[in-house]
Image (cartoon, coloured by chain):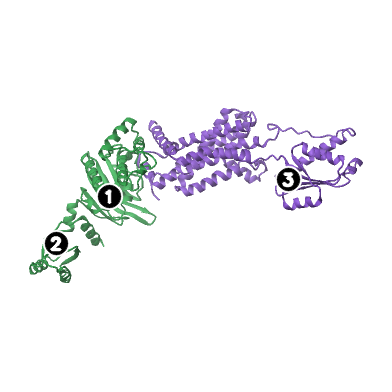
Chain colours: A purple, B green
C-alpha cells in the first residue's frame, strides 16, 4: 500500500514539474477559462435590447404616437422615424435595419371605430432568435397601447400573468454562466491529459517508466493528480467570476457543488488519459480530444439545445456524456436550493462515468513496448 | 549463489509474420560484460527489451535469477537498470530533477537519492551540476547522465542498449571505462553495440544477424575459431602492390584485400602461399596480424550464408 502511494506521488511530482516548466500549458489552463467567461458572458447575449426599429408613420395621429411612445419606453426598440417611402426602401435594401413598422393612413380612425386597426411589421427573418423576440415584444407593446388608450372605456379582459421561477427576469446570464464550467472543464481537462501519455510514448520516456517497478494504476492516478489541482483552480476561478462579475446568485449547497466538480473534473481528465493511452500519438490524441471534449459540451449538454426538445434517441444519447449531468447539477445549485435528494441521479451518473474512465484508462494502459 | 544470472532458451519474438528474434539461446554469468553485436535490425533491441520485461516473448523462455521474466516482471524490475537507445531523460527538467524522479520510482528516500546522485556524478566525472534543463547539455553528458539515472537504485543487472551510438570517440572511451568499473563492482552489464571495436572490451559476446545468433564466445575464442590461421599482411618494399594483388588472386591462395599501401590475405593454402612469398621476398615482407572482431563478424556472416 505504501509502495502504491509512493509511486503515485513520484509520478504526480514528476508531472507537476513538467507543468511548471510548460509555459504554454499553464497559459492555456489559466487564460482559456477567462476567455470563455468573457466570450460567453459578454459577447453571447441571448437578450435583445434596443433593436433598431424603422418607423414610417403615415397616420400621424394620437394613436400612432402612443404606439411609438410605448415602443421606445420599453427599451426593447430604438425608434427611428423615416419620412419618405424612398428612404424606407433604401434602408431595407441596404439591409442595415432589421425591423420596420409601417403605420398606414386611417390607423387612428380604425382604432377609434373599434374595427381592426392594421399596421405592418417587417422583421429580418435570418436571425430567428431576434425575430421571435421582436414579435413577442411588439405584441406586448400593442397590448400596452390598447390599455393606455381604451382602459377608461372597457373593462379589463382576462390575462395570464406569467411568473418565471428561479430566474424571474429570464436573464440569459443566469442561464449561461452556470454552464461555463461545464464547457471549460469538458474541453480543457480532456486536452490537458490527452497529451501526457502520448508525449511519453513519442519521446521514448515511456520505455524507461515501463522498465521500473511502476504499475499502470500508479501511472494513471499519478498523472491525474496535478492536472486535477490545475483544473480545480480553473473551476473556482470561473465560479468566483460568475458571482462577482455577473452577479449570479448561488442558492444551493457549495459543498455539493464542489463534490460535483470533483467527479466531473476527474472523469474528464481520465477520459483525456484514456484517449492518450489508446492513441499513443500526440497528434491523434489532440484530434480525439477536440472531438470528444468540445462537441458534446455544446451539442449534448443542454447548454444551447434543450435536452427535452431532442428526438428520443438523442435524449438518451446525452446520458453518455458527463457534460449533461454536470450542467444539470450546476444550474440547479446556482439557481435553486436543490439538495442531493433532488440531484442523486446526475451525481450517480457523474460518479459512474468517473470510475469507468479511470478503470478503462488503467486497463488499456500498455505495459509493454510492442508496436 | 548460482553463477548464471540470465538464461535465454529458444526465444522467439515475432511481430505478425516477421520474426525479429528467431530461436536464440544463451546464458550470461554474474559479473560479466556481455556484448550483443550485430548490424541495425539484427534483433538486439528487441532482445534487450524482452530481457527487461517490457516486451513479451512469442515463445521460449527468459529466466533472470532463475525466475521467469514474462511471468513475474514485478519481481525482476527493482533489480535491473535499463538505458534505452532513445534518450529517455526528461529534457525539460534539470539534472537533479531527473535523478530525483528516477530515484523516486524505485522508492528511494530523498536523502538516499541525493547521496547516490553525488556518488554517480563523481562516477561519470560530472564536476558541475547545471541548473538548466537537460536539453541544453552536450550529447556526451546527456548519455552519461542517462546511465547514471538508470543505475540510481544500484541494480545488480544493467542493460545498455547502444549506449555509445552517435557519440564522439572520447565519450565512447569514457563510457566503456565506466562499464568496466561497473563490472569490477560485481555488476552484470548486458550491452548492445554495432561498433565491433567496442566488443573487444566485453568478456563474452554474441554475434547476431537477422534474428539469429551466429556465434557466442569470448572475443579471443571467436578469433581463434574463425581465424585458425591469422591474417597475413604484406608490407611492400617496392611499388608493386597492384601486380602482387592480381598474382595472388590468380594463385587462389586465399581471400586478398587491399589495406591502404598493404595487402591482407586470409590464407587458405599455406604451402602455396609460402612458396610464393619466398620467390618475392625482395618485393615485400609478410607478417601475421591479429584479426579484428570486424574480420570475425564478416567471416561469420559469410559462413552463415
> Dot 2 corresponds to which residue?
B232
Give the total number of marks visible in the rendering: 3
In front: label 3 or label 2: 3
Nearer to us of marks 1 and 2 is 1
Tell me if mark 2 has few (under 14), some (14-19) or many (20+) residues whose alpha carbon lies within 10 angstroms of its own.
some
Cα gap from disc 1 to disc 3, whole angstroms: 75 Å
Badge 3 density bin: few <14, some 14–19, many ≥20, Cα 10 Å: some
Circles 1 and 2 in contact, beta carbons < 8 Å: no
How far across and how far down the image is residue B133, in percent? Answer: 37, 40
Q: Is residue A353 left or right of residue A163?
A: left
Label 1 resides on the chain identified as B
Q: Quadrant of residue B230?
A: bottom left
Mark 1 or 3: the one toward you: 1
For disc 3, the marked residue is A131
Same subunit: marks 3 and 2: no
The residue labelled by disc 1 is B168
Q: Relative to A165, is B137 above or below? A: below
- Which of disc 2 and disc 1 is earlier in sequence? 1
Disc 2 is placed on an element classified as strand
**Label 1: which secondary element:** loop
Between B249 and A28, the residue placed more toward the observer is A28
Whole-number angstrom distance, CA of label 3 to CA of label 2:
100 Å
Q: Nearer the viewer, residue A366 or B223?
A: B223
Give the side of residue A146 with respect to residue A29, left or right.
right
For disc 2, the chain is: B
Amino acid at each position: 500500500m505504501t509502495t502504491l502511494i509512493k509511486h503515485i506521488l513520484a509520478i504526480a511530482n514528476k508531472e507537476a514539474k513538467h507543468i511548471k516548466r510548460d509555459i504554454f500549458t499553464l497559459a492555456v489552463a489559466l487564460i482559456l477559462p477567462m476567455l470563455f467567461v468573457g466570450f460567453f458572458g459578454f459577447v453571447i447575449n441571448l437578450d435583445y435590447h434596443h433593436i433598431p426599429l424603422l418607423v414610417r408613420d403615415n397616420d400621424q395621429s394620437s394613436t400612432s404616437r402612443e404606439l411609438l411612445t410605448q415602443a421606445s419606453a420599453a427599451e426593447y426598440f430604438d425608434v427611428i422615424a423615416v419620412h419618405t417611402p424612398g428612404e424606407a426602401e433604401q434602408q431595407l435594401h441596404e439591409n442595415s435595419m432589421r425591423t420596420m413598422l409601417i403605420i398606414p393612413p386611417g390607423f387612428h380612425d380604425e382604432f377609434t371605430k373599434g374595427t381592426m386597426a392594421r399596421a405592418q411589421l417587417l422583421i429580418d427573418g435570418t436571425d430567428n432568435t431576434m425575430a421571435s423576440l421582436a414579435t413577442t415584444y411588439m405584441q406586448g407593446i400593442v397590448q400596452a397601447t390598447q390599455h393606455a388608450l381604451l382602459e377608461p372605456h372597457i373593462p379589463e379582459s382576462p390575462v395570464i400573468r406569467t411568473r418565471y421561477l428561479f430566474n424571474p427576469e429570464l436573464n440569459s446570464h443566469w442561464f449561461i454562466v452556470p454552464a461555463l464550467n461545464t464547457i471549460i472543464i469538458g474541453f480543457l481537462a480532456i486536452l490537458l491529459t490527452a497529451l501526457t501519455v502520448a508525449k511519453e510514448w513519442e519521446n521514448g520516456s515511456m520505455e524507461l517508466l515501463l522498465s521500473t517497478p511502476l504499475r499502470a494504476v500508479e501511472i494513471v492516478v499519478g498523472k491525474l493528480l496535478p492536472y486535477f489541482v490545475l483544473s480545480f483552480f480553473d473551476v473556482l476561478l470561473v465560479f468566483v467570476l460568475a458571482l462577482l462579475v455577473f452577479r449570479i446568485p448561488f442558492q444551493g449547497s457549495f459543498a455539493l457543488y464542489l463534490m460535483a466538480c470533483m467527479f466531473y473534473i476527474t472523469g474528464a481528465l481520465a477520459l483525456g488519459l484514456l484517449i492518450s493511452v489508446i492513441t499513443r500519438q500526440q497528434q491523434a490524441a489532440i484530434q480525439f480530444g477536440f472531438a470528444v471534449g468540445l462537441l458534446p459540451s455544446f451539442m449534448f449538454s443542454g447548454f444551447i439545445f434543450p435536452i427535452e426538445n431532442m428526438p428520443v434517441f438523442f435524449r438518451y444519447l446525452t446520458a453518455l456524456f458527463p457534460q449533461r449531468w454536470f450542467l444539470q447539477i450546476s444550474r440547479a445549485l446556482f439557481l435553486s436550493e436543490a439538495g442531493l435528494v433532488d440531484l442523486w441521479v446526475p451525481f450517480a451518473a457523474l460518479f459512474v462515468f468517473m470510475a469507468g474512465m479511470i478503470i478503462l484508462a488503467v486497463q488499456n494502459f500498455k505495459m509493454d513496448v510492442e508496436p | 549463489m548460482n553463477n548464471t544470472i540470465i538464461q535465454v532458451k529458444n526465444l522467439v519474438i515475432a511481430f505478425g509474420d516477421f520474426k525479429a528474434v528467431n530461436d536464440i539461446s544463451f546464458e550470461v554469468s554474474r559479473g560479466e560484460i556481455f556484448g550483443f553485436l550485430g548490424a541495425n535490425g539484427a534483433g538486439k533491441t528487441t532482445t534487450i527489451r524482452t530481457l527487461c520485461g517490457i516486451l513479451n516473448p512469442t515463445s521460449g523462455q527468459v529466466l533472470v535469477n532463475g525466475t521467469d521474466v514474462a511471468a513475474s516482471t514485478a519481481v525482476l524490475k527493482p533489480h535491473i537498470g535499463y538505458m534505452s537507445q532513445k534518450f529517455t531523460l526528461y529534457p525539460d527538467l534539470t539534472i537533479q530533477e531527473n535523478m530525483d524522479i528516477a530515484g523516486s520510482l524505485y522508492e528511494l528516500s530523498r536523502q538516499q537519492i541525493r547521496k547516490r546522485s553525488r556518488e554517480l556524478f563523481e562516477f561519470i566525472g560530472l564536476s558541475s551540476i547545471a541548473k538548466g534543463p537537460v536539453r541544453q547539455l552536450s550529447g556526451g553528458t546527456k548519455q552519461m547522465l542517462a546511465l547514471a539515472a538508470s543505475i540510481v537504485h544500484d541494480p545488480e543487472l544493467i542493460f545498455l542498449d547502444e549506449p555509445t551510438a552517435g557519440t564522439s570517440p572520447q565519450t565512447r572511451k569514457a563510457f566503456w571505462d565506466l562499464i568496466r568499473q561497473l563490472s569490477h563492482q560485481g555488476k552484470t552489464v548486458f550491452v548492445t553495440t554495432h561498433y565491433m571495436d567496442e566488443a573487444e572490451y566485453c568478456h563474452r559476446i554474441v554475434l547476431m544477424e537477422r534474428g539469429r545468433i551466429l556465434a557466442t564466445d569470448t572475443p579471443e575464442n571467436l578469433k581463434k575459431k574463425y581465424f585458425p590461421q591469422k591474417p597475413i599482411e604484406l608490407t611492400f618494399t617496392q611499388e608493386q602492390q597492384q601486380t602482387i594483388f592480381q598474382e595472388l588472386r590468380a594463385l587462389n591462395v586465399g581471400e586478398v584485400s587491399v589495406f591502404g599501401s598493404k595487402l591482407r590475405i586470409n590464407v587458405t593454402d599455406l604451402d602455396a602461399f609460402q612458396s610464393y612469398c619466398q620467390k618475392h621476398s625482395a618485393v615485400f615482407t609478410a607478417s601475421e596480424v591479429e584479426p579484428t572482431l570486424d574480420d570475425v563478424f564478416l567471416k561469420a556472416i559469410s559462413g552463415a550464408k
